[in-house]
Image: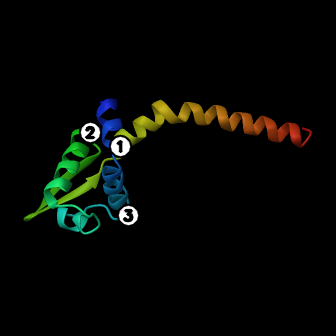
Amino acid sequence: MNADKVFKALGDPTRRKLLDLLCAQNGQTLGELCEHLDMKRQSVTQHIGLLEEANLLSTVWRGREKLHFINPVPLHEVYERWVRKFEQQRLSLLHDLKKELEGE
């Protein structure tokens, strides 16, 4: 995983919206994605290109249509590296607080 590319890709609200759209319905064409964005196809294509560079999207050709799919692996790697370790500590503290408040 290239974390810099993933974080750069996730740093833009349009790219996050594209991921949200694909999360709601995976396997959309460029035209379908453009229907939900107030920008030209060329701009959306550039955003998709950055998501592909970060390996957050993959594409599959079906006839003449190019379908876009989320690749969840880089997001999972970010979660494992940057989120999970902090989540474990927080949950542990909440568990200890619960036990103390309940007098266990």
Q: Earlier in the sequence, mark 3 or mark 2?
A: 3
Q: Is residue 45 above or below residue 92?
A: below
**For the N terminus, which image quadrant?**
top left
Query: x%, y% of residue 54?
Result: 26, 39
**For the C terminus, which image quadrant?**
top right
In the image, 44 versus 92, the foreground residue is 44
Name the amino acid, label 1: Leu
Q: Secondary structure at mark 2?
A: loop
Which residue: 31% across, 53% down?
14
Instruction: Bin the neighbour count of mark 2 within 10 Å (Cα to Cα): few under 14, some 14-19, many 20 and up.
Output: many
Query: x%, y% of residue 75?
Result: 39, 42
In the image, 33 versus 66, the foreground residue is 33
Tell me if label 2 and label 1 are in contact, CB under 8 Å: yes
**Outermost residue toward the left in this view:** 64
Residue 97: numbered disc? none
Q: Secondary structure at mark 1?
A: helix
Which residue: 21% across, 39% down?
53
Q: What's the image's color scheme?
A: rainbow
Q: Is residue 43 above or below residue 76?
A: below
- List the residue tagged with mark 1: 10
Q: Is residue 1 visible?
A: no
In the image, 57 versus 60, the foreground residue is 57
Q: How many marks?
A: 3
Q: CA distance from mark 2 to mark 1?
A: 9 Å
Residue 54: numbered disc? 2
Instruction: Bin the neighbour count of mark 3 within 10 Å (Cα to Cα): few under 14, some 14-19, many 20 and up.
Output: few
Tell me if label 3 and label 2 are in contact, CB under 8 Å: no
- List the residue tagged with mark 3: 24
